[in-house]
Amino acid sequence: MIGGRLIILILYIVGVYVFSFIIGVANLFTFNNVSLESLVNKTFDYIIVGSGSAGSLLAKRLSQNKNLTILLIESGGDVRPGFLDIPSLGLMLQGTAYDWKYTTVPQKWGAYGLAGNRSKWPMGKLVGGTAQFNNLMYLRGHPDDFKEWYKDLPSFDYKRDILPYYKKLESTGDSFLSRLPFTSSAAEYALNAFKSLGYNVNKNQLDSFVGFGSPYVNIKNGKRWTSFHQLLSHDRPNVFLLSHTTALEVLFRSNYEAYGVKYIRSGETVVSLARHGVILSAGVIGSPKLLMMSGVGVKSHLQSVNIETKLDLPVGDNLQDHITTGFSLVTFNDTLDFGVGISTMLNPLTALEYFRTQSGPWTTVGCEVNGFINTKNPKNPLAQPDLQLMMLPLGIEEDSGLYLRKLMGISDATWYNYFHHVNKSIAVLPVLLHPKSRGTVRLESKNIDKQPLIDPNYLSVEDDVETLYEGIQIVKKFVDAEPMRNLGAELNALPLPGCEHLTFDSEPYWFCYLRHMTYTAYHPVGTCKMGADDASVVGYDFKVRGTNRLYVVDASVFPTLTSGNVNAAVLMMAEKAADVILEQLFLKTGFCCILEIFKMKTVCEI
Ligand SMILES: Cc1cc2nc3c(=O)[nH]c(=O)nc-3n(C[C@H](O)[C@H](O)[C@H](O)COP(=O)(O)OP(=O)(O)OC[C@H]3O[C@@H](n4cnc5c(N)ncnc54)[C@H](O)[C@@H]3O)c2cc1C
Ligand SMILES: *[C@@H]1O[C@H](CO)[C@@H](O)[C@H](O)[C@H]1NC(C)=O
Ligand SMILES: *[C@@H]1O[C@H](CO)[C@@H](O)[C@H](O)[C@H]1NC(C)=O
Ligand SMILES: *[C@@H]1O[C@H](CO)[C@@H](O)[C@H](O)[C@H]1NC(C)=O
Ligand SMILES: *[C@@H]1O[C@H](CO)[C@@H](O)[C@H](O)[C@H]1NC(C)=O
Ligand SMILES: *[C@@H]1O[C@H](CO)[C@@H](O)[C@H](O)[C@H]1NC(C)=O
């Protein structure tokens, strides 16, 4: 038995290193056949920086008009072995050449259980961006989230201004919504437990309303399906994709009109020009970084890194992230098997099942049960939730510390004294949906290769700890619910390094716990806030304030976090932005004035 486990772990860790090596080699190659000479000083209609969720969707929409040429610039590689579309492999891309491998600065108010008090922030550095290794969950958020975004736009109406874009996204011919292709036996138990606690359990969870169910995912025929996959699935002779190419600077005319992008490719610095606009979709770190490199940012900061300020805007402020906690808190007897452990994943029969039926454990996205709760107003089914609860049928201890704990940056002290002793657990994770803490992204230097200084300022507002504490109370009730008790569930009472002096399960203990076990839920947003006030970087038309023909469209424009995983909202915003940008183009060129009057605008989008 012990020997069997050891062999599996050896296979696993060898697999991880071989995998990482394959990615490293793949990343050296490029399919790209666009010659540099054909780009120098050449004019495109639009230049899009970043081929992630937003950038790929914009490229798809804008290029539907065959008269428009689009240059799509991507820092990462474009060779992506097809087997990476197996959903469960996403996790393995973290820490490889396809990851920017960001780390936050040491956190002052939390994350003490992580090495150096730093949180690791994986982010996609390849075509398709972060969605190439995210967990594929698709949740629209709550209508009130968007009312908050558009609070300075009195005429705002969710049903008219947001919902149609979600529907457009979801109803496109190559739409990518599917039910979970696989859940382990733990899902049934967990749903029953939540039901027994009186929560509404509805299986169709698209909007983030109070209640429990299982999420929709971006999977098609058992494979990962992103906006980049969509872009590739169409013939697009008018999109020029340049991988391994990093944008260095947006070029402005004296009236702040963006006219081109300076970028570096194979060591050569090149300029391409944009006739109608430059769109930054470089993500929540990439977009503010590029703006600051171009002289758009907080003046005092730009001065401190010797960049001449062209426009003084709060770029990099307003950083927010969903915080979660509670890994390996719900523990079981060692002998329990939900059918998703390493041995199942490495079992050849699981592979066979996948290739024969495009389902089974290899299609897992991790989260199997998802719920939304409003702790202050628990009875109102329509209230905007303040907590999300995600159930994943695994704990960090699953791979004996070989890989998972390193991805998450768990400190040695916390690993060896705490997680290491857990035999078997599942993750029941409360996620703080609307944190009050705000952080910043700043440049460390003018050098493009340097990582920016990322400070989410986790738990700097006490309220955030209090809401998460309510989440812990729900986890406790969950453990006590009959379906869980019958399985022998117990709350992990091992002494947590840093909190050993406190009585287990007392309020001070949990507050201490939360400030140690502070994890990212991987949803940073907000660094180029959209709005109409002085704290905004872009207007409601996605245009950088005070400039012309320069847009930002990606997770960085969120004024606040949505109630749920953010990728659906990123895609929805990109749909909206495509409409806004094309409308501006056609209005400018007069093409659609007549159609506009007769409400036939869709004709222009072709
Ligand atoms: C581990 C993990 C799990 C997640 N799970 C989920 C989930 O289940 N559901 C969900 O809704 N959300 C999830 N998310 C979040 C979601 O995937 C992201 O919020 C979303 O993909 C962000 O899209 P984006 O377009 O803003 O940026 P990205 O997709 O990150 O795209 C930015 C692109 O720009 C490129 N770039 C950056 N700088 C430059 C430059 N200077 N020049 C050229 N190119 C540049 C990057 O390489 C990248 O390809 C997860 C995130 C992570 C990390
Ligand atoms: C591109 O434009 C720059 C600036 O106008 C000029 O110096 C350079 O020679 C041009 N390069 C080519 C290849 O035309
Ligand atoms: C595309 O260009 C052609 C030729 O200039 C023009 O006739 C046509 O109307 C254009 N179509 C759109 C959708 O702009
Ligand atoms: C991490 O936080 C703890 C608790 O506040 C502190 O004692 C320690 O010095 C911090 N370590 C670093 C590297 O900042
Ligand atoms: C775990 O379960 C097995 C089988 O039910 C039982 O024999 C064993 O005593 C249990 N171990 C613990 C530590 O409870
Ligand atoms: C793990 O299992 C072993 C053997 O069954 C047991 O002695 C130990 O107490 C368990 N650890 C925890 C943290 O429950």
Image: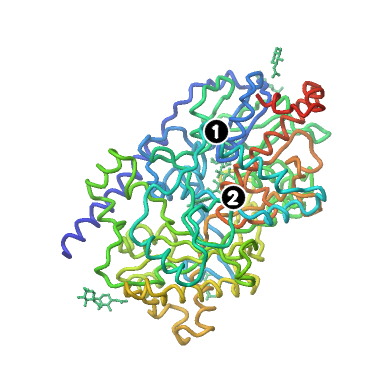
Q: Is residue 164 above or below residue 61?
A: below
Q: Is residue 74 left or right of residue 214?
A: right
Crowd rating for badge 2 (residues with CA inside 10 Å; few <14, some 14–19, many 20+): many
Q: Residue 185 falls in which quadrant of the image? A: bottom left
Tell me the CA gap for discs 2 and 1: 32 Å
Q: Which residue is mark 1?
A: 245
Residue 476: x %, y % from top left = 46, 76
Which three-letter amino acid code belongs to the residue tagged 1?
Thr
Q: Is residue 360 left or right of residue 202?
A: left
Does the image show residue 421? no
Disc 1: residue Cβ within 8 A of ligand 1's nearest atom:
yes
Q: Residue 500 falls in which quadrant of the image? A: bottom left
Quadrant position of ligand 6: bottom left
Q: Which residue is mark 2?
A: 140
Does the image show residue 27? yes
Q: Quadrant of the N terminus?
A: bottom left
Residue 441: x %, y % from top left = 64, 54
Query: What secondary structure is found at the residue carrying circle 1?
Result: strand
Q: Is residue 346 above or below residue 425?
A: above
